[in-house]
Amino acid sequence: MGTFHSVSKKHLHRYLSEFEFRWNTRTLDDGQRFSRAVSAAVGKRLRYAQ
């Protein structure tokens, strides 16, 4: 069935960033990939609404 059934223009850059990250870390195992994602998020805030 797939994961993404529709992609909005508003969030297209987010989808592309996710796939880029997955492609660039394709040789890592899940634990290494998770560690890299968490270390990249240190000091950043997740904002849903402004």
Image (cartoon, grey):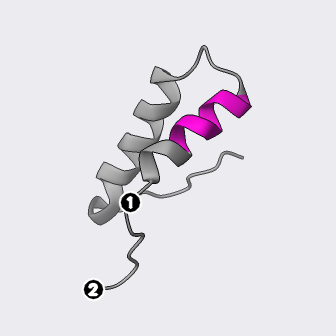
Secondary structure beneath dot 2 equals: loop
Residue lying farthest to the bottom in this orientation: 50
Give the farthest residue toward the front: 43
The residue singled out by tag 2 in the image is 50
Image coordinates of residue 10 in percent, x first then y, are 28, 65
Q: Residue at x 37, y 41 (%)?
A: 16
Near mark 1 (Cα within 10 A), the count class, few <14, some 14-19 or many ≥20, is few
Q: What is the x, y in percent for residue 26? A: 57, 19
Check residue 36 for magenta coloring. yes
Q: Residue 11: where, in percent of width, then height?
A: 34, 61
Q: Which of these two is toward me, 23 or 32?
A: 32
Indicate the amino acid at tag 1. Answer: Gly
45 horizontally vs 29: left or right: left
Magenta-tinted stretch: 30-37
Q: Which amino acid type is shown beneath numbered disc 2?
A: Gln
Residue at image coords 38%, 76%: 47
| Residue at the extreme top | 27
- Closest to the observer, 37 or 13: 37
The label on residue 43 is: 1
Lower sequence index among marks 2 and 1: 1
Q: Is residue 4 magenta?
A: no
